[in-house]
Every structure is written in structure tokens, then in C-alpha cells.
Image (cartoon, rainbow, N blue to C red):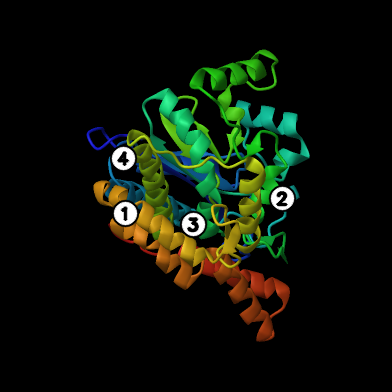
Amino acid sequence: MPSSTEKFTVGIEEEYLLIDPETRDLISEPSDAVLQDCEAAIDASVGGVRPEFLRAQVEVGTEVCTSIAEARHHLTTLRRTVAEVAENHGMKIIAASTHPFANWSSQRHTDKDRYNVLAQDMQTLAHRLLICGMHVHVGVEDPEDRIDLLNQIPYFLPHILALTTSSSFWQGQNTGLKSYRVSVFDEMPRTGLPEKFDSYGEYERHVKMLVDAELIEDSSKIWWDVRPHGIFPTLEMRIADICTRLEDGLTIAALYACLLSMLSRLRRDNQRWRVYSNMLVHENRWLAQRYGIDGGLVDFGKGERVPYADLLEEIITLVREDAQRLDCVAEVERARQIIADGTSAHHQVAIYEKATGEGADAREALAAVVDWLAEESLRGIAGD
């Protein structure tokens, strides 16, 4: 993470689902023209659009941004452009980490070398990847700093996941989890919390072992909740569900950047955040996955479970100096609003229960959830 005299950079990736406005189901075989039209409509200075593993998915990524404000402009433009192109082709997009009722076995994967290899290698595990996420890259130029932060940031990853949950439903069922996406992705190898390393060299030796053994082609097949990127000098956060509301996603990006900044600042002051075992952090990860912001998380310093709102206030205080320096105080403090309003998962379940309580059958109630997702995914993107 850059010091106060170095350059701050951030990039955001989001994955969207393409749906049929009439059936509300996924469009498993969209025309290639959809992606082509998106590519033609997006200025490369803003970012890019790419196919994802499933044909029903579209991924966007901002260009390297030097502020959260710039990231807002780029991400808004990308989400709006994809939504407009989809509408021109008779489709809509939803920003949610699972579709409320789509069947994974009906989906088709993208015919691309990387995805064909993935499908062949992972078999049913890959075909079940009907999930979307949001990834946030923060520039950390020094590789040793990247590893040091990789060791420390996992403590806060459950706190981030809890604020982003948008995947309570899976194939028409309320799973009872706020983030079922995590369960689906955890079936894959090389997922979950990252290993801890003493140096960047040690990390590289471990990756080389996997490559030399022909288990992976490169480090891009390491899908931890946070990882050093294999090409860019960034630490990439991957634990988050995609936020249905764009502003929520920007809050997450700002919070993650400020947490890295705070940890780097402590290090420069010869202090350090205590590194807890994966055994303990996994418990908070589960609580966030199961309950989101509702069940609280364990404060390992106190050794007790604490309401999430209390933990958030502590985090906001911890990163206040960093949020001021990075000019994203408003975005960080907006996390309080996410708690007050509820995450996408809360709204999806509430809409489903309201509809069934008023006499709708399960499919009608799920359609109402999709309609809400389609509407909320466009909130705030009509203009810059």
C-alpha cells in the first residue's frame, strides 16, 4: 500500500448475469453480438468487458484508478453501458452473486481455451459455478509489502463479506445463508483463506512447485479470498459477493483500500496487527457467510462475539486517517447505511417472504426477487 507520498491505485471488477425480462431466467446462450457491442461501446480509458466462465455472465473491470471518485466514474460507466447493450438485445442484467432460481445444469460455459481446460479439469465443480463476485485490486508496488499485507488482511475479510452478501437463493431455494456463493466456490481447490508466507520468495517457490508439477499453469489458478495478482502489482480481494447497489460496492472498495493503508501505516510506525490463525478467522468467515451482518463476529482480542455494528464502528475509527488521506471518508462511513438498509440478501429474502405471504406461489415470488434485482442493479447509474 502506498505511503502518503506514493501513488494510490485501485481497480474494481464486477460480474453480471444476463436475464430474460419475460421469464426472469438466465439467458444461457446469448448472442456473441452482446459482448461485441459492449466492447465497441466502452472506451478503453474507462475499462473493459470480458466473457466469464458461463455464457450467461459478463465481467467488467475498471482501468487503474487513482481515487475512489475515479473508480465511481469508471464503474458507473461500465455497468450502465452493459445494461444499455443488454436492453438493446432484449435482455436485462442483475448484479447478484447467485440467480434466485436458475439451474446450473442448464448453463453453457464459454468456448475459450482457459474455460475449456477449467471445465475438463474441474468437471461438475466448474459447471456449478453459477456465481458472480466483485474483486478489488489495490496497488502495492513492493512484493514483500504485498506478502506482509497478505498475512494480515485476512482478519478483516469476514467483515467485508458480511457487508456484501447477495446470494441467499440457490436453484429456487432459500438456503438460509446470506452468502451461498461462498459455499459453491469453496468446493473448488485453492480457495478460501490464503496461506501465510515469510517472504515473497517463499510464496513464489510454492507457486513454482504447483506449476512444475503441472497442477496449475500459473498463479491465476490460485483462487484465495485475497491473493497477490500474478500480473499486476496489486493485492486482489476476492471474498466479496457482488453488491447489487453500485454505491455499496464502492464502499467496499474504499473500506478495503483503507484497511490496507491502515496496516501499512502501522508497519511504518513499527507496529503490527496481530496475525490470527486461519482456524479462528475461518469461524468469522462462516458467521459472515451464514448470518451476514446479523449474527455478529468474534472479537479475538476480547475472545467474545460482538455485534457487527460495534465492530464496524471500531473499523471506521481505525481507518479514519487513511480515509481522509485517500479522500473516501463518505464512502467508508456509508457502511453504516448498508447496516441500516440491509444487504441485497436481506432484501431478496424479504421480497420473497412478502410475496408468498400475499398468496404468490414460489415461482412468482422468485420472479419478484429477480425484478427487484434488475431494478436495483441500475440504481444510481443513469448519469454520472
Q: CA distance from mark 4 to mark 2?
A: 35 Å
Q: In the rendered image, which residue does mark 1 sit on? A: 320
At 42% across and 41% down in the image, what residue appears? 61
Label drawn at residue 104: 2
Q: In the rendered image, which residue does mark 4 sit on? A: 65
Amino acid residing under circle 2: Trp
Q: Earlier in the sequence, mark 1 or mark 4?
A: 4
Q: Earlier in the sequence, mark 3 or mark 4?
A: 4
Q: Position of residue 36 (x, y in %)?
A: 46, 39
Please tell me whether residue 45 is drawn above or below residue 259 in the rendered image.
Answer: above
Amino acid residing under circle 1: Arg
Q: Is residue 378 visible?
A: no
Q: In the rendered image, which residue does mark 3 sit on? A: 243
Q: Quadrant of the N terminus?
A: top left
Q: Position of residue 370 (x, y in %)?
A: 58, 66
**Is 260 positioned to the left or the right of 191 in the image?**
left
